[in-house]
Amino acid sequence: MIEFNEFSFRYREGAEPVVRDITLSIPDGCFVGITGAAGSGKSTLTYAINGIIPHCYPGDFYGSVTVEGCDTVDTSLTDLSRLVGSVCQDIDSQMVSTVVEDEILYGLENFAVPREEIPARVDEALASMGIADLRDRTIDSLSGGQKQKVAVASVLALHPKVLVLDEPTAELDPASSVTVFDLLARYAREHGTTVVVVEQKIALLSDYADMLVIVDEGRIRFADTPDAVLAHSEELLALGVNVPRSTTLMNALSAQGLYAGPTVRNVAGAAAALKEVLA
Amino acid sequence: MIEFKNVSASYDGELAVLNDVSFTVNNGDFVAFVGTNGAGKSTTMRLVNGLLKPTSGEVLIDGVPTTSLKTSELARRIGFLFQNPDRQICCNTVREELMFGFKALGEEGSEAEARVDAMIERFGFDADAEPYLLNRGTRQLLALASIIVLAPPTIILDEPTTGLDFRECVKVMDVVRELNENGTTVIMVCHDMEVVGDFARRVIAMTAGRVVADGPTFEVLRDGRVLKEAHILPPQVTEVSLILGREAACPAAVAEANTVAQMVTAVAQACDREVEDVEVEAID
Amino acid sequence: MAKFLEYVPGESFLHRMNPCVKLIGAVLIAIACFVTSNLVFLLILLAAALVMAASCGLGRETAGLCKAVFAFSLILAVVILLTTPHGMPLVPLPWGYIGTGSLLAALTVVVRLMAAAIPLFLVFYVTKMNDLTNAAVKQLHVPYKYAFTFTSTVHFIPVFMNDMAGIMEAQTARGVEFDGSFAKKVRLMIPLCVPLLVSSVRKTNSAAIAAEVRGFNLRTRTSGYKDYPLHGEDFIAIAVCALVLAVAIALAVVG
């Protein structure tokens, strides 16, 4: 469980708070997608979960954020890291090793995972991201998608309760993006891991997330199931948030009086709904 | 006009990253290159403006091989917007940044000043602002502006919308569309298939350093073999129509729709017919 | 091709050796190269270094490296050639002459630098950076923070070089002509340090945070999972390197 309680934050060098009055609770095992226009404060929300705020970026912190009952202000960054695994936006600078296996070992060594457990943890982490065959490759020789999977696997090896990812598919092509989301969603389902992902690709989020959070100018405008959020397409567009083309299509059909069903969030949904319309 | 004639290329003389690639881009075209990372799209872009020279074959710009064009001549003919604007931006103010290209080409003067002023006005930039303090989307626009201010006949865009939010993406693409309408040739590498479907008139799909398809946008994006081979997902409406098209009873217009408007019209038509049928029955 | 100082996977004898032994051995040889000026001895060391490189299939990488070291040492060699009037005069200069001795001295500098540099660089080609630092932390008791700083620095060199290449490419596309005299190139590159600096600061900052959230602060000398046992070959290798140094010192004393 992650709980934001009237959370506001102002970076020391900023004049205004970047996020304000955030109250949100994320149940265990939930796959949460956060999106919003540039500068809306969506990354700041993830920093608040993994403790980078306030531990790395100082500023004014109001309200509280708790992860699994631990207050992120009172808990040290290292202790929070045992609960929350983070994959940063810039994966190239996140890597500390030359070879994939060493990258997975890094966190395990630091958190003093018992020696006898380590081999199994490494195997499991590699397998869960489908990269067992990359074990001995140099990181430099990997494609962007493969690197992203290594970054995620190196964090999954630590068995975090919560996984936080900041734009994990920004550098990836659509096929690799879908693969990364597929693997993440499957892992989270199997292990009951809570996943919080910031992402611009709304179609991807709508397809995978259990909860969609829309941030605008530091405030949460919507936090609900994708279907419920996408029902507000017009408002989303006004906030600078795109909606999946499938949703736009079905909305256009409803406007013409050709479709009267619920909001659609992906291609499969649109195809199924249209089949009914055409039948 | 840009011609690739059996072009192969490699970095450091090792494994070929581009293998026997041929195509022609005519003046005024709007072409999108699609395919997975590592398919050779960015390499192709580097070859177009001579940053990379082919190991075999020829790249011709208006009939002249890139190998015999000087850097400044290439820069005059082709504007290149890189994926990361921060690699491009290097001046202390927005105005200097916009003047930079003229300086590099030795073309400073009142004409240049006037064009820079027009660009500042058009994009609503703060001329004295420090580029590094602008947000990502504005930096991307500044990078674009500093290229199009030189009015190159062709522009290359390497993933112009990556890292931008929806609003910024619309802004950038509106500028690009307008340029194209006024005759600028646009060559773009793009992962966002909705953007490709909305803007490009022609798609070249690549995989493993080869061209696997080259044709009108939706002809390529509806070709099952190409989609599979190049690992690309079609735009959502196209995908919906492809799924519906598999049903025997699907009306042709629905099975061929690629845009929201086309699909709505097609569905309306399909339903109208039913309504008419009902009416016919009622009349009977 | 391997990038600058980057690990090249392999199974050769040198790959399998203990990382600390490799590092110490290379340092011993480098010291040996600097204590003696015996050209024959240096040539033997250079030949041995090249044989070692070839033995682990790194001939090409080493050749590239040799070129770079050669170019650098050539500058030194020219300076020595012009400023050390020794031996039989060959070419008169306004301030002295170039003699056979100057030629010999210049040649010695080139051979010495190459013989000293190749083993050191070879260490990085045949050792994973993590093994090197982990072994150094475990066996040589180097504080982890220093080891990590070192790894990160080496790790970031290719990243920054890549950044610089990207920045130069972007400017070339805008019509900046970098080809030309060295002075012109430098003048054009200076303003580009700003974007490089901006991206470096960003990258190092996010790297530091990324390491911290993966338990950097908890790491101790014993954290490393892998062990780096010393085998018979390792002792022999160290003994050979020590012997080389001893011979070099002896030659220096005798000569």
Image (cartoon, rainbow, N blue to C red):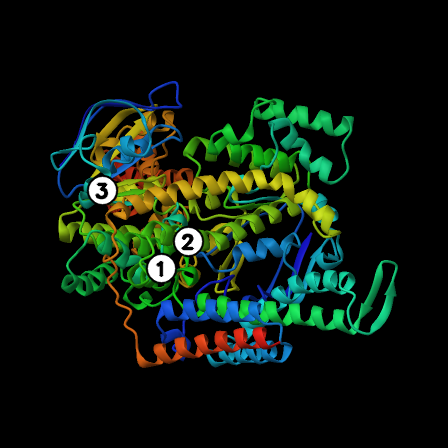
Closer to us: mark 1 or mark 3?
A: 1
Give the position of the N terminus of chain A as an image quadrant: top left
Residue C8 drawn at (x, y percent): 44, 69
The numbered mark 1 sits on a residue in which chain? C
Give the camera-side residue of A137 and A228: A137
Residue A162 drawn at (x, y percent): 19, 43
Distance CA(mark 1)–CA(mark 3): 22 Å
In the image, taking residue B69 as reference, residue C31 lies left or right, namely: left
Give the camera-side residue of B93 and B186: B93
Q: Please name the residue shown 34% across and 38% down the image.
A: A249
Up-down relation of residue A47 to residue A161 (above or below): above
Q: Name the residue under label 2.
A: C150
Type of the residue with mark 3: Thr
Structural crowding at the residue carrying mark 1, measured as other residues with C-alpha within 10 Å and reported as few (<14), some (14–19) or many (≥20)? many
The numbered mark 2 sits on a residue in which chain? C
Q: How many labels does the image show?
A: 3
Residue C83 drawn at (x, y percent): 76, 60
Q: Mark 3 points at which residue?
A: A78
Q: Are marks 2 and 1 in contact (CB under 8 Å)?
A: yes
Q: Is mark 3 on a helix, strand or loop?
A: helix
Type of the residue with mark 1: Thr
